[in-house]
Image (cartoon, rainbow, N blue to C red):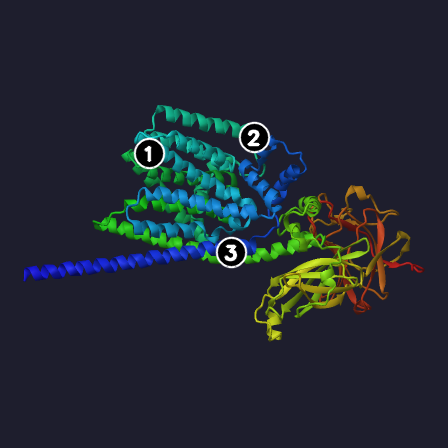
Amino acid sequence: MAVAMGGLRKRYSSGMTNIGSIVRLFITVSLLIFCAVIVLTTILAQIRFGGAVPLSDQWTDFDYTRRLAEGRLRFSELFDQHNEHRIFFPRLIFFLDYLIANNTNTVDLTFNLLIVAGTLFSILALYRKLEKDRSVYLGLAAIATVILFSLSQRENFLWGFQVQFFGAVAAAAAAFLAFSVSIERAQRGGGAMAPRCLAYFLVLVDTYTLSNGILAAFLLIPMALALRAGRAVVFSTAGWALLLAASYFFNFHPVQGHSPYLYSITHPLDYLAYLSGYLGNLVTCLGLAEPLRSRGAILLGAIGLLLTLAALARSLRTWDEAPARVALLALILFVLGTAMLTALGRITFGLEQAFSGRYVTPVSVFWMAHICYWGPLRRLRDGLGAGLALAGVAMVAGLMFCAVKGHVRGWREGANQALTTAQARDAFLSDVRDDATYRNVFPVAEVIVQHLPFMRDHHLSMFADADNRLLGQKPAWLAAPPADQCLGAIDVMEPLSTNDGKISLSVTGWAWDLSARGAVKRVLFTDATGTVIGYAGGGWPRPDVRAAVPVVSHDKVGWTGFLKADPAAPIRAYGLTGGRHVCLIGEKAAPQNHSRFVPLSSLGDDVPVATGPILSGGWSKNGQNAAAGPLPGGGDVYGSWGGADSNVGDMRIGPFTVSKARIAFPVVTGPHAENQVAMLLDAETGAELRSYPLILSTVWTALEIELPEAAMGKAVILVFRDHGTGWGEWSAVGALHEVAPGTP
């Protein structure tokens, strides 16, 4: 009987073991499949949303690429500061993108993926030395892949310039891996010089990738001490770190606008809150509302700080850690040091700045290093060990959930970013200056304007595509009868500015390709001669179209773009559907130019206005730039310059009543009249009756405007609006006048 019961227990135990193995295999395979989906969708996001348009700091750093192309770049200039960083190695990647991909971000975005893959390899290589259970290793490898490739880091994955944010943490992880390997080899009596030299080179790369990279070099010193690498290794490592620091800070200049370090010392609680919020910023990917978001991030970051202190105390107590675990601790301390430096320089920017997507990258590595540090130390033999293991599983699951939620959110944000970036692209391609659109990719329009002609002439960035270089041309394939059929319309044409007799227009509409049963992604505008005069991009939501047109199956059929045309000239919009096949979307006449210059002598009697002008923003009496001088003949004038081109605001004149179709007023503008406009409003309803872009004039002249019939005999208000922050963007006007008799 006892033998029989023993056999039953053995078979039961064996069966349970088999079931457990099957469950573990299923979970592991599911995680691996899921991580593959995450990686593939991140790559797809780069393809769909990345694009060739330079973003953010790429515009300022493009000057180095330009000097390279013109043969006037000195090697020493590659070490020039970019803010507080010396981005020598990222600039080499940017140059490679210029040399083999025409500055289209193709190389940059590819390096983003490869660098993250390198970070993942370094962490998993260290973890593999510590983890004995193969299935647990594969499961955590899948989780690490999800966290490190999550689009919660959208800003870094989709901006070509962000290679340094990936590169800094990747170089540190690889350096710590190489250094630990050199120690292991030395302990076994093998050749340690090659991996040690590799570690020294990698901290050099790190130092000249981002400013925090110098931390990696100095963290090799305690690694050498903790692992008893020997006096020669410790001194050579310390000497190399000091040499790197000396070279980095040679001719270094502090960055203006950063937080004073004294603030952090005098506000320790604020500093600790920023530091914790930085280390817990993965929580912000959940889209929580304030104050729950900040509290959640600070709580998670505080847990990370406690775990770091525990890991440091454990290693100092035992003083006999495996090299791989010491390397993981060094990586944890590297990210912690990065967070501490960031807090010192940016604490006054507010906690929101710590939640920036670019910082999710080092924080993701911070938490993966913690998981790989603590995971192999699990023990399930007692209640305390089982409880800690369960808490660890819950935390890993929470981090995984944050990464997945952030991935979905990042996809949506990437799609929105692609629309606004494409809008700026089409303004560039159409040679239309619209500062509000330009600010979608860089806040200073003058920097963009400085580089666009060079990019256009050298077929770089968005101009690398031949279809983006058709402005002013008459393509033969466009003149052929359209091969495809489209539904659509030109809905709104909004004047932006007037120059050399042409009106710059922002144009919106919708289009549906009947042949492909999908939205039209690109639109070309032509004049009556078939000359291309502008571009537009599709994908904008238009639920009204879907509701009104049954054949349209989704909302994203809107497009928006730009063009320059003669007043009242006919404009055609064509959908570019692939393979240079086009379909006619619609035709519409450009708006009339309802304003023109006339001599100051054409100013007649004053238009009676009961009250003085109402000023806001930068508008002030005699607020024109001194270069314009006073109004010839005298009289009150009001300008938006007010001491700086960046000033913006409105001036309201009225209500007043007119009985004649034309009025005029003195006007002068800065060197750029873009974003300077006058709007005629119905005084009773506030409805806009007509808009008049101010024409460029750097000397005082008179501008005559034609009033719509709807304004005759009504109380109206004339609003002068300056919404341009760029250099030379200001305007000034005088009193309203009737047009003198005899003026043509």
Give the number of the mark in front: 1 or 2.
1
User: Residue 483's mark?
Assistant: none
User: Residue 184's mark?
Assistant: 1
Measure the alpha-carbon separation of dots 3 and 2.
40 Å
Q: Is residue 682 visible?
A: no
Question: Which is nearer the eye, 46 or 458?
Answer: 458
Which residue corresponds to mark 3? 44
Which quadrant holds the C terminus?
A: bottom right
Q: Give the side of residue 385 with respect to residue 544, left or right.
A: left
Which residue is at 77% across, 44% downward?
625
Which quadrant holds the N terminus?
A: bottom left
Q: Position of residue 300 (x, y in %)?
A: 39, 49
Which residue corresponds to mark 2? 252
In the image, residue 367 above or below residue 604: above
Helix, strand or loop for disc 1? helix
Question: Which is nearer the eye, 105 or 716?
Answer: 105
